[in-house]
Image: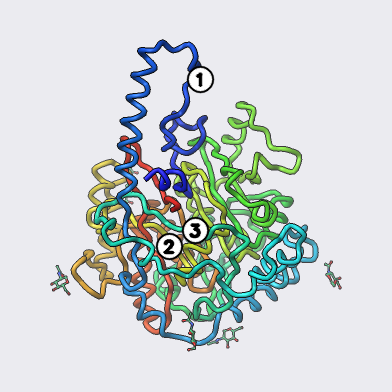
Amino acid sequence: MASIHQRGDVIVSVGSKSNEKGDGVPLRVARRPRKFGSISRQRLSVWLLFIGAVFFMYMSFFSVKVHFHGEKEYGMSSLFSVPKRGLEGYVTQSSSATREKENGTSSLFSVPKRGLEGYINQRTSSPTSRKEDVISSVFNVPKRGIESNIPPKRRSPKHYPCDIELAKSVEYILEPKDYLNITHFEVDYVEKEEESLLASPYKLRFAGHQTLEARERSFIAINQSLHCGFVKGPNGMGSTGFDLDEKDQKFMKSCVVVVSSCIFGSSDFLRRPTSKLISEFSKTHVCFVMFLDEETLQKLLSEGNVPDDRGFIGLWRIVVVRNLPYEDMRRTGKVPKLLAHRLFPSSRYSIWLDSKMRLNADPLLILEYFLWRTKSEYAISKHYDRQCVWEEVLQNKRLNKYNHTAIDEQFQFYQSDGLTKFNSSDPHIPLPSYVPEGSLIIRAHTPMSNLFSCLWFNEVDRFTSRDQLSFAYTFLKLKQSNPDKPFFLNMFKAVTEWNGVWKFMISLL
Ligand SMILES: *[C@@H]1O[C@H](CO)[C@@H](O)[C@H](O)[C@H]1NC(C)=O
Ligand SMILES: *[C@@H]1O[C@H](CO)[C@@H](O)[C@H](O)[C@H]1NC(C)=O
Ligand SMILES: *[C@@H]1O[C@H](CO)[C@@H](O)[C@H](O)[C@H]1NC(C)=O
Ligand SMILES: *[C@@H]1O[C@H](CO)[C@@H](O)[C@H](O)[C@H]1NC(C)=O
Ligand SMILES: *[C@@H]1O[C@H](CO)[C@@H](O)[C@H](O)[C@H]1NC(C)=O
């Protein structure tokens, strides 16, 4: 048990506000009181008792491990039998597309043209690498199935932290070449609104004015021009919002692997990634970008969190967003959350973290665990509690999360378009849950994954900003519109409640 404790850790942790200034790992309950010496014996023993009790609870809690669902449970296994071309093709495609841009960019990676595979290989020749002989095959980490990691007696049907086994070190991982047979097509994005489509009175919108017919077409995975935010007015009519400095844009263009988060409207604290858990390699090769609006930046400055002259606070590269596209800060937050592939045009992988979470693991290990190992191009956690959108709608209304009329409109639209209730006894259910918990999203920027992100964003723009309401509909409609084209989505289980505070935890074994 103790060894589980010692080796256990969390990839991301949710801080309650009170714990913000703390060490970021909320379960380190037995934090040493500062004035330990001055505490009387009586109080000391009370403390010890308390700590013991908490430790006991912690242990009994953590020893219950959750069976991590395999592909089969998702009904995904059937998806793995389809097309032929590997990631390779996509990689070359995307790197040639970005090649022109790379010249002027201060590239983070010294070998960006070779793609991720190239840069990871490159480590073998770097002086710090000691594993030269090992990094020749795709996975040097023992390829034990997730299934077999977990002794059957420890499985529990309840929602407790998932113990997962990340690779031991980034030294051992390599981006697999053909880890999945992705669907190939070319998407370009609507950059400028056509004048004829603009409604009068004339009003520019960040997401443009997509007609319902265009929306319907957009779900088909073919070469097409797609609405996906960042739509400008016709003929230099100016910006529709989400304006970034040129310097920041240049930086963002250089990113190949991105971890990003945002705080708008001063709604949260800045939580820095736990530096000691992140490899030197990732520190120099992964972009950690925190999007802030000016109000939040002012608050940070007033608290003494001042970006250095390169624009960093700790590992976070601070990017200030001006001219926010929506009045609703939550909706504005969906831009960096869902559209990483647009903000970082050269990127091939991205990890999204809600600002309430702190990154506690190396991003490359996260990619390896959630995407490469499970052969997925999109990974998102399922909700800890709810599986059915019907329940989610009720809950949203109960907590007054959003204008009820708008929720009803969206929901009725979805039902009339064929959204059905989640049926857990249906063996062919296409998703393990219809309700996501989107605080952590891990994506490979493949065409299908990018298409899904754009479609999901368009729903959030058209209807309510509650993205949990549109996730399953978007996924199911995408799947239905492309029966022969797989989309490898990994919906994992990772959330739990503990001590009255919602925690999002993925424990490492
Ligand atoms: C980009 O690099 C190529 C080859 O090194 C060079 O010919 C070209 O002029 C460069 N373009 C820019 C915009 O710097
Ligand atoms: C991709 O397709 C090829 C050819 O059908 C197959 O040999 C390979 O195993 C597939 N790869 C994956 C990851 O499914
Ligand atoms: C889609 O675009 C790609 C690249 O431009 C092209 O090779 C392919 O033939 C196109 N597919 C269709 C169906 O037009
Ligand atoms: C709620 O949404 C409906 C329909 O979208 C809209 O007509 C109404 O004005 C909204 N109410 C409020 C208070 O925003
Ligand atoms: C759920 O799925 C099972 C198995 O396919 C089916 O028998 C049952 O009728 C379904 N329930 C509902 C409410 O659709």
Observer-nearest of 344 and 29: 29
Instruction: Tell me the residue at 55%/81% (across/down).
Output: 86
Residue 329: image location, x then y, percent:
47, 43
Q: Cβ of disc 1 within 8 Å of ligand 4?
A: no
Query: Who comes first in sequence, dot 3 or dot 1?
Result: 1
Q: Residue at x 34, y 30 (%)?
A: 52
Q: Earlier in the sequence, mark 1 or mark 2?
A: 1
Q: Residue at x 28, y 62 (%)?
A: 152
Q: Is mark 3 within 8 Å of ligand 2?
A: no
Quadrant for residue 129, please give it.
bottom right
| Relative horizontal placement of residue 91, taking residue 509 as reference (left or right) | right
**Disc 3 and disc 1 in contact, CB within 8 angstroms:** no
Judge by depth and name the residue closer to the eye, 453 or 271.
Answer: 271
Residue that badge 1 annotates: 34
Check residue 166 in the rendering and tell me which mark sits there, or answer none: 3
Element on which disc 3 rests = loop
User: Looking at the image, what colour scheme do you see?
Assistant: rainbow
> In the rendered structure, are the residues bearing label 1 and label 2 in contact, judged by CB atoms less than 8 Å apart?
no
Q: Position of residue 388 (x, y in %)?
A: 25, 59
Q: Quadrant of residue 479?
A: bottom left
Q: Which quadrant of the structure image shows residue 100?
A: bottom right
Question: What residue is shown with label 2?
Answer: 456
Q: Residues within 10 Å of mark 3 (few under 14, many from 20)?
A: many
Alpha carbon distance from label 3 to label 1: 34 Å
C-alpha separation, residue under disc 2 versus residue under disc 3 = 29 Å
Whether residue 312 is visible here, answered yes or no, is: yes
Residue type, label 2: Trp
Q: Is residue 192 visible?
A: no
* Amino acid, disc 1: Arg
Secondary structure beneath label 1:
loop
